Amino acid sequence: MPRGRFSRVLLVMLTLSVAANVALWRTGTLRAVRAPGDVLEGQGGIAGVLSAEDSGNGTVSSRSGAAASGVAATLAFLASIEDEHLRPAREIADAWWSGGGDYQSAYAGALSQGLASMRDELARRFGNDVKDDPALRWLYRPLDPLYWFLSSDEQLAIQNLRLERDKALQAAAREASRPAAGASAPNAMAVDEGLTLGIMREYQSDLAALLHADALLELELRDSAIAQQLRASGVSLSESEFRDAYTLLASLQRETADPVDAAAVRDRLRGLLGNRRFAALWAARDPMFAEISVIAERHSLAEATALSAYELINEFQDRRSELARTAGLHPDRAAQDARALADDERAALSRLVGEAVADEIVRGRARLSYQLFSGSRESQGGRFR
């Protein structure tokens, strides 16, 4: 992915809503758990423990009364610890007008700490198995149902990683929004791309250390820049095609990836999807398609014609890459073959969109190639994408 585009892929902070949690409790999500051998017959978990306490105090006279008391006691108990542990988050939320640039970050941090404190109290009172109580699924499995394949501990750890990642990204954005020395106004888009990439790579590294390979792949298929590109491309893909396309595109993110790898990926993607779907998919990653689209719109050409022109450019790009791979075998012919290939491409474009538009497309590609090449040379640690 081009660096400029990557730096703008800042993921929205994922946090739990206190109001949603309260709504869950009020609509009966917290219910007695039927598990033989629990504190009361047919009633376990928190409800069982609390109703047992009431029964021991002589406040419950029947099993139906015990069940009702257990549910009521559960609601009251959870509401009380919510009020205690989430008070700092609520105070920040209630002062939304005075939080400054750190308002959302401060709220998310306070909410995360409050929920962790609630889990600690529940574990102290009811034991570590309390996390398996369905009544508390929202608290111990906050990333369900999207990440159902992850354990409770993994979900909570990932939630913390995301919080730290987003705090770092927000700090980078705030720093970029400050006016540089001698500047009259801040440049909100001047986020340090190297810093952004570093933050995202650290996040990916932490994920890889936390999850085994299969779970990591499942997570990235649902939440990654590449997966989002695939979905945003508008190309209709089956689950199998999506998985294969993701794997191919992700291989280009390796530190050792080079233009030869890219050519192989393009060949395999084209074989997987066919020419038209490949062109539409690759267009989502390639700024050249945006260049062609602007030119086509300026000349009132149909969107399908723009995609056909881009498909043609892609075809000749692959032929050009193949020529580059074999140039060492026939160096005397390489330059001549390259000129002939350029002439063929120019003629094919002219037949499709006319000579004037073809000239604009060729010039636009040259200009864009120069810009990308210059940017990659100026960047530190740049690599092929």
Image (cartoon, rainbow, N blue to C red):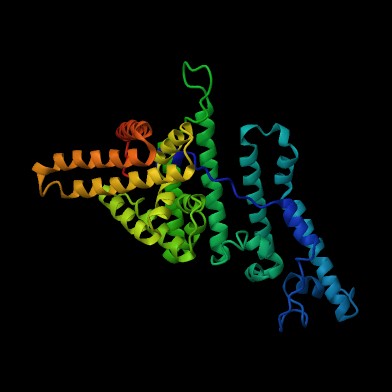
Q: Is residue 275 above or below residue 149?
A: above
Instruction: Classify residue 204 as left or right of residue 271.
Output: right
> At 67% across and 61% down in the image, what residue appears?
138
> At 43% across and 48% down in the image, what residue appears?
202
Can residue 106 be seen here? The reply is yes
Residue 180, percent across and down? 47, 21
Instruction: Classify residue 103 as left or right of residue 64.
Output: left
Residue 254, percent across and down? 33, 52
> At 46% across and 56% down in the image, what residue appears?
207
How many numbered marks, from 0 up? 0
The quadrant in which the N terminus is found is top left
Residue 241, percent across and down? 44, 63
Front in this rendered view, residue 17 or 6: 6
Q: Is residue 337 above or below residue 368?
A: below
Quarter where residue 152 is shown: bottom right
Can residue 385 be seen here? The reply is no
Front in this rendered view, residue 131 or 170: 170
Residue 149, percent across and down? 54, 67
The quadrant in which the C terminus is found is top left
Q: Is residue 193 above or below residue 226?
A: above
Instruction: Classify residue 112 as left or right of residue 277.
Output: right
